[in-house]
Image (cartoon, rainbow, N blue to C red):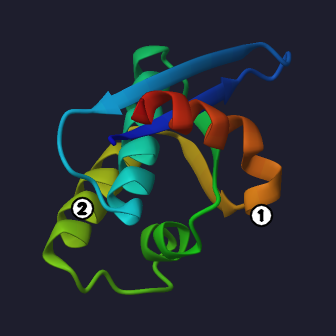
């Protein structure tokens, strides 16, 4: 049907900025997870955010970016290098894995993006 991703940025004051992205290309699940991370980082940089806690329900992506897992698929290697390059623009950034059930709002946005 389609692929998409949902991103929610939350300010320290609790304000929410939601973004839905529809892909005009075929995306595997891990590709969509990397697209969410990369697009979220780009939005945060555009907003001049310098300290960030990023959360994802993709254990694979979180562990690859944090250095615990190797990216063995060529596309994942490209996504990983690009995400790491973006992370260098932040003063402080922490990437955390959250259970899928705690990521339901983002999943709902991703479903909208896939339509």
CA–CA distance in space, label 1 to label 2: 25 Å
| Residue 38, horizontal then vertical, whole percent | 37, 43
The numbered mark, 1 or 2, whose residue comes first in the sequence reads 2
Q: Residue furthest front?
A: 1
The correct choice, above or below, for 80 with respect to 33 in the image is: below
The correct choice, above or below, for 93 with respect to 29 in the image is: above
User: Counting other residues with Cα less than 10 Å from the Cα at mark 1, is it few (<14), some (14-19), or many (20 or more)?
Assistant: few
| Residue 4, horizontal then vertical, whole percent | 40, 38
| Residue 70, horizontal then vertical, whole percent | 35, 86
The correct choice, above or below, for 75 with respect to 26 in the image is: below
Q: Secondary structure at mark 1?
A: loop
Give residue 85's mark.
Answer: none
In what quadrant of the picture does the C terminus appear? Answer: top left
- When asked about the image quadrant of residue 41, the answer is top left
Q: Residue at x 74, y 20 (%)?
A: 11
19 to the left or right of 55: left
In what quadrant of the picture does the N terminus appear? Answer: top left
State which mark lies toward you, 1 or 2. 1
Q: Of 110 and 90, which appears nearest the observer?
A: 110
Give residue 99's mark.
Answer: 1
Q: Which residue is mark 2?
A: 81
């Amino acid at each position: 049907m389609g692929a998409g991703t949902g991103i929610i940025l939350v300010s320290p004051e609790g304000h929410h900025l939601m973004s839905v992205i529809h892909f005009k290309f075929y995306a595997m699940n891990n590709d969509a997870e990397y697209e969410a991370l990369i697009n979220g980082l780009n939005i945060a940089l555009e907003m001049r955010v310098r300290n960030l806690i990023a959360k994802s329900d993709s254990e694979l992506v979180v562990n690859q970016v944090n250095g615990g897992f190797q990216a063995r698929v060529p596309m994942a290697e490209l996504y990983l290098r690009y995400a790491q390059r973006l992370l260098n623009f932040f003063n402080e950034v922490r990437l955390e894995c959250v259970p899928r059930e705690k990521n339901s709002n983002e999943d709902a946005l991703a479903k909208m993006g896939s339509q």
